Image: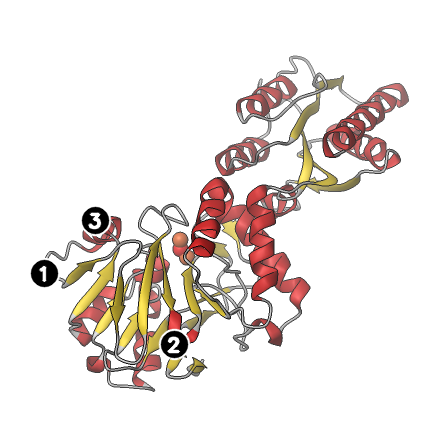
């Protein structure tokens, strides 16, 4: 991809990863992604972040389209995760920068990753600033957004926030800006990204948003390290992050299940029917059809998550164990949960699911529901009733 000037003398110099599907080993990126890096041409030529190691030559040529790599004076490491620092050793070797700016934790994590004691680290923290000539950078540490080392870089002369992982989306494209793509698609991908990457740190997101406001930063462009740059809809993504981090819930339930011989699936459909009859919107998701990260994309704004598995070898099916482990780690808060499943002889799965949901601090207003072998019409009526009760509980909760 060609470099793009995003502000006067500030360039996008990232790479597009069209073929990525497995994002960081846990989330599905069905549209690929981008690794955004930015280059400021000023008295001090400054590079913000890099790209994965495997793209280091693409990145090198991107930069060389604008300047000689040895012209780089400063490198800012906003985040050490290897999708943003993998090419750093190669670039440092070629550029021999005067300074590498990072947070105190960033320095530790860089040393842990690359073992380079002799790099010219310059540790910065919230409130520090550095002049580049015409422009300057103000730093703000954003611990756990997405790692303990993370920070924002703000260029006040351009009202530009370089936000690292925050406000990102996984979309590979030839366009770079939010007004060059369908806004609903962009916000949907931002929600999917938030639900799978940022969700556990929601209380910290709220603090960072407040700190940005308190700092009085005027922002007319947000340049994240993945996906599109926000310039026409800055207000929309800031509002979306306020809502995502507040875990604003809808009158919506996710019924997620795995099944062997379709008995648990029949129960899932009947529960969904009961929810719908009471006016609750439902996403019915088989774990054989939906990746756990796509289910989390729907859990993001669902008031209830209802999980089902038949009993297999005295436990739940592996895909349900995978999903519950994944969801528990992402710490969705304030939601209703419920468990169900069919069984042949022992029937432990539904109880085990209910226990995981309790451990994950879900509110379980109904007992788990079990059906032996194949559900009868009466069994399905009980499933439907379970759906109706949960819908009523959702509506009471949202009232
Ligand atoms: Fe895009 Fe936390 O790395």
Q: Earlier in the sequence, mark 2 or mark 3?
A: 2
Circle 1: is it few (<14), some (14-19), or many (20+) Cα within 10 Å?
A: few
Q: Does 218 sit above or below residue 71?
A: above
Helix, strand or loop status at disc 1: loop
Which quarter of the rendering shows the N terminus?
bottom left
In the rendered image, residue 276, in percent from the top left (x then y), is placed at 84, 37
Q: Earlier in the sequence, mark 2 or mark 1?
A: 2
**Residue 327 visible somewhere in the drawing:** yes
| Residue in the image at 63% along x and 72% along y | 181
| Residue in the image at 42% along x and 75% along y | 158
Instruction: Classify residue 124 by image quadrant.
Output: bottom left
Q: CA distance from mark 1 to mark 3?
A: 13 Å
Helix, strand or loop status at disc 2: loop
Q: Does 345 sit above or below residue 168?
A: above
Q: CA distance from mark 2 to mark 3?
A: 26 Å
Helix, strand or loop status at disc 3: helix
- Read off the residue under disc 1: 118
Label 2 CB-ligand 1 distance < 8 A: no
| Residue in the image at 28% along x and 82% along y | 42
- Read off the residue under disc 3: 108
Q: Does 391 sit above or below residue 183?
A: above
- Read off the residue under disc 2: 13
In the rendered image, residue 137, in percent from the top left (x then y), is placed at 31, 68
Closest to the observer: 388 or 313?
388
Q: Quadrant of ligand 1?
A: bottom left
In the rendered image, residue 85, in percent from the top left (x then y), is placed at 30, 61
């Amino acid at each position: 991809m060609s470099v793009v000037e995003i502000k006067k003398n500030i360039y996008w110099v990232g790479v597009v990863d069209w073929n990525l599907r497995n994002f960081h080993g846990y989330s599905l990126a069905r549209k690929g992604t981008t690794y955004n890096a930015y280059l400021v041409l000023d008295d001090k030529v400054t590079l913000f972040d890099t790209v994965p190691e495997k793209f280091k030559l693409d990145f090198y040529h991107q930069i060389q389209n604008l300047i000689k790599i040895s012209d780089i004076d400063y490198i800012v490491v906003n985040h050490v995760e290897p999708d943003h620092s993998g090419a750093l050793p190669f670039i440092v070797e070629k550029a021999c920068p005067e300074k590498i700016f990072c947070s105190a934790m960033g320095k530790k994590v860089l040393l842990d990753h690359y073992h380079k004691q002799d790099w010219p680290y310059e540790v910065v923290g919230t409130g520090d600033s550095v002049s580049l000539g015409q422009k300057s950078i103000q730093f703000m540490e954003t611990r756990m957004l997405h790692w303990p080392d993370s920070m924002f870089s703000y260029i006040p002369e351009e009202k530009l926030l370089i936000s690292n992982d925050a406000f990102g989306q996984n979309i590979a494209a030839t366009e770079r800006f939010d007004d060059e793509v369908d806004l609903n698609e962009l916000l949907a991908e931002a929600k999917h990204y938030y639900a799978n990457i940022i969700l556990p740190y929601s209380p910290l997101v709220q603090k960072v948003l407040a700190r940005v406001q308190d700092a009085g930063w005027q922002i007319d462009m947000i340049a994240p390290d993945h996906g599109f740059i926000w310039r026409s809809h800055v207000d929309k993504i800031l509002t979306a992050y306020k809502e995502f981090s507040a875990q604003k819930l809808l009158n919506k339930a996710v019924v997620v299940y795995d099944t062997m011989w379709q008995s648990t699936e029949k129960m899932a459909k009947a529960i969904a029917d009961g929810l719908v009859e009471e006016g609750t919107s439902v996403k019915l998701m088989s774990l054989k059809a939906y990746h756990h990260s796509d289910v989390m994309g729907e859990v993001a704004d669902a008031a209830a998550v209802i999980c089902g598995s038949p009993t297999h070898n005295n436990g739940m099916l592996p895909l349900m164990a995978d999903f519950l482990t994944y969801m528990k780690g992402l710490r969705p808060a304030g939601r209703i949960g419920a468990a169900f499943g069919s069984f042949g002889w022992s029937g432990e799965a539904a109880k085990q699911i209910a226990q995981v949901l309790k451990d994950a601090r879900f509110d379980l207003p109904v007992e788990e529901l079990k059906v032996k072998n194949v559900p009868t019409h009466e069994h399905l009526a009980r499933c439907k009733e379970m759906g109706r009760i949960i819908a009523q509980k959702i509506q009471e909760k949202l009232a």
